[in-house]
Amino acid sequence: MPSDRSVTSPAPARPRHRVYAGPEQFQGDEVFLTTEETHHLSRVLRLAVGDRVEVADGCGQVFQAEICQLAAATARLRLLAAMPATGESPLQITLGIALVRADTFDLIIRQMTEMGVWRLVPFYAERSLARPETWHPGKLARWRRLAQGALKSSERSFLPDIAAPVAFAQALTGNEPLKVLCWEDLRRQTMPRKLVLEPRPHKVRLLIGPEGGFTEKEVALATAAGFQLLGLGPRRLRVETAAVAAVCLLQHLWGDMPG
C-alpha cells in the first residue's frame, strides 16, 4: 500500500462510522468505495457529501476521510488524517476449525474476527459433514466479505487471513511455539498446569473439531505434532460456542482480554 499519501494531522474527534476499502482502492489522497460499501454508506448509514467516516484498509492503516462524491456505483472520499490502529491483540491466534454447515461457519467467521483471531484455517476432519467435493471457491470470497463487515463493527485494523479448506494433517503444521487442541473427552478435567505455566507466547495455533468431535486417531496425530490437549469445561459445547470459549481463554491468558 502506498506510504506517500498527503494527509493532514492531527485529526478531530473520531467519526462514528467506519467503512472498508482494500489497498487497491486508494489513489493518492483519495479512496474509491465499492458499490456494496457505497450502498451501505448512503442507504444504511444515511450519510451524505461532507460527512466524515473512518476508512480501514484491513492491512493496519485507518484514516479519517470526508465524503466528496456519492454516485450509484461508487463513492469518492478524501483522506484527511491517519488514525491510530486499534483492536489488535498482542497474541496472534491461528484458529484451525473443522468445517461445519454454512450458516454456522458464517457466524464463526464474524465472531472470530470480532475476537481478534489473526488467521483462520478451515479443515476437513474425519467426522466433518462438509466434504472436499462440495467445496466452491465462491465460499472463500463470501467469508472474506463477512470478515470485512466484522472488521468495521469491531473497529479492528487488520483483516484475519482466511485460508481455503485443507486436510486435517495440513492444519497441524505451523511455526507457532504453542499449539493447543480442544478435545471434548477432556471436558471434565481442569486446565493443565503445564499450559498455564507456559511462557507468554506471541503466537498460538488452536484447533477446534467438528460436531462429532475429533477421533482418537486425529488426537494422536496432533499430540505427535506437539499439540497440548485442552478441555473446555463440563458441558458439551457446539462448535461455534467452543471456538468463542477457547479464544476467550487464550486472550485472557496471553492476549488483551481482562480478567
Image (spheres, rainbow, N blue to C red):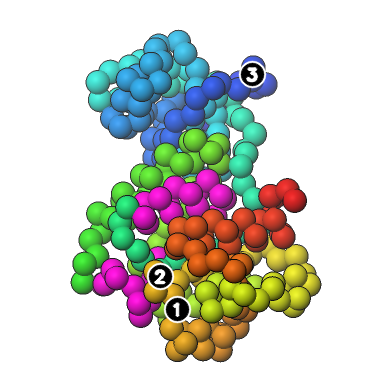
| Separation of residues labelled 2 and 1 (CA atoms) | 7 Å
The one nearer the camera, 14 or 66, is 14
Q: Position of residue 67 (x, y in %)?
A: 43, 17
Q: Is the C-beta separation of discs 2 and 1 under 8 Å?
A: yes
Per the model, the C-alpha gap separating discs 3 and 2 is: 45 Å
Rendered location of residue 130, percent (x, y): 28, 68
Give the percent coordinates (x, y) of residue 100. 35, 64
63 lies above or below 257: above
Secondary element type, mark 3 = loop
Please tell me the numbered disc located at residue 49.
none
Residue 73 found in image quarter:
top left
Instruction: Based on the picture, tell me whether residue 129 belongs to the magenta stretch.
Output: yes
The image quadrant of residue 171 is bottom left
Single out the mark in the foreground, 3 or 2.
Answer: 2
Dot 1: what SS?
loop
On the image, numbered disc 3 is attached to which residue? 13
Q: Which mark is residue 214?
A: 1
Could you classify mark 3 by the number of other residues whose Cα lies within 10 Å: few (under 14), some (14-19), or many (20 or more)?
Answer: few
Give the answer, above or below, for where 39 lies relative to 69. Answer: below
Alpha carbon separation for disc pair 1 and 3: 49 Å
Quadrant assignment, res 49: top left
- Amino acid identity at mark 1: Phe
Q: Earlier in the sequence, mark 3 or mark 2?
A: 3
Q: Looking at the image, do the residues carrying marks 1 and 3 touch, with CB atoms under 8 Å apart?
A: no
- Amino acid type at image mark 2: Pro
Residue, disc 2: 210
Please state the extent of the stretch shown in magenta in the rendering: 104-132
What residue appears at the point 45 percent right and 71 percent down from the top-left corner?
A: 209
In-image side of 255 versus 236 (left or right): right
- The residue that appears at 39% across and 74% down in the rendered structure is 212
Q: Secondary structure at mark 2?
A: loop
Which one is in front in this view, the residue at disc 1 or the one at disc 3? 1
